[in-house]
Image: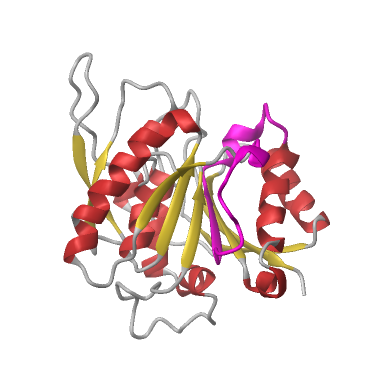
Amino acid sequence: MNDQQHSYLKELPKVERESGKRAIESEVPALKGKVTLRIGQDEHDAHVGSTVWPCGAYLLDSIVEAPAVAAAFTGKKAADGAEGFKLGDLKGVKVLDIGGGTGYVACGIAAAGADVTTTEIPECVPLLDQNATIFNNTTGMHLAETGHVTAAALDWSAPEKSTVDLAPFDVLVVCECFYAIENLGHSVLVDFIAKFLKSGGSGAASKRAVFAFEERDDDIEADILVQLKAKGAHVHALRKSAPVTKGESNQHPDPVHYQILVATLAA
């Protein structure tokens, strides 16, 4: 369903830039302002994982605003929203985050109560680990409702090289990974998601994969969904943003939409 346009989607806080040095930490709101996270970003690094992206903010805010999104994490039936989302509502949920980037999404989910293992390709893990440590030593220490964030190396395009065990996790988060698969082939990501959904033996049917992405290429997105269904997954939409003007006509359509989907094993 569509929702109202939010100002945070237009522009996230920018880090201060120091020539030749890593960008310093900035305070970034999450979960509709329920928490403020200290996130280190590096705008001098060409890797897209060194920056906080608006779609991550949309996903975190949707956990608070959209009962169906929160339910995708908890595995429980969506509430009517009468009481509203509270920090700690994701307590006990174990989340695996791939393509974690700066760790902003992982730290926000942990602030909501979940224990999160956030992953990236090896060269991006130092920044990810830095931000996980900052969270655990600040927000994680001062709010009793929060979970814990662990950073680890995982290249989902070469999962055979990973030592991360998929079985213990309830939820897989795939935020802004679709854009990266044009050169890798769609089946690489689909195979990893299907492997996750089928991990864990008899409890596999309860596993969920939550996708959040900026609409960029309808053909890629449609092909991923077709392939997931062919692997035995059931996919349905949870939320779609109203048009958001970003003013980045070189790489993004203007205005843009953000979408959140969930995949489970078909019954």
Q: Is residue 114 left or right of residue 203?
A: left
- Looking at the figure, which quarter contains the C terminus? bottom right
Instruction: Residue at 75%, 54% (x, y): give it.
Output: 228
- Taking 66 as reference, is 142 left or right? left
Q: Which residues are magenta?
A: 157-185
Q: Which residue is depicted at the point 68% across and 48% down?
A: 192
- Residue at the front extreme, as displayed: 163
Q: Position of residue 121 (x, y in %)?
A: 51, 34
Q: Is residue 219 magenta?
A: no
Residue 20 location, quadrant: top left
Is 165 or 210 nearer to us in this picture? 165
In this orientation, which residue lies closer to the viewer: 75 or 161? 161
Q: Is residue 168 above or below residue 16?
A: below
Question: Residue 213 at what x, y percent from top left?
Answer: 53, 47
Q: Tell me, yes or no, if residue 11 can be seen here.
A: no
View extreme (top): residue: 20
x 63%, y 37%: residue: 161
Q: Is residue 128 above or below residue 32?
A: above
Q: Residue 49: horizontal and vertical position, in percent?
A: 43, 34
Residue 180 falls within the magenta-colored stretch:
yes
State the count of labels. 0
Residue 72 visible in the snapshot: yes
Q: Is residue 53 left or right of residue 158?
A: left
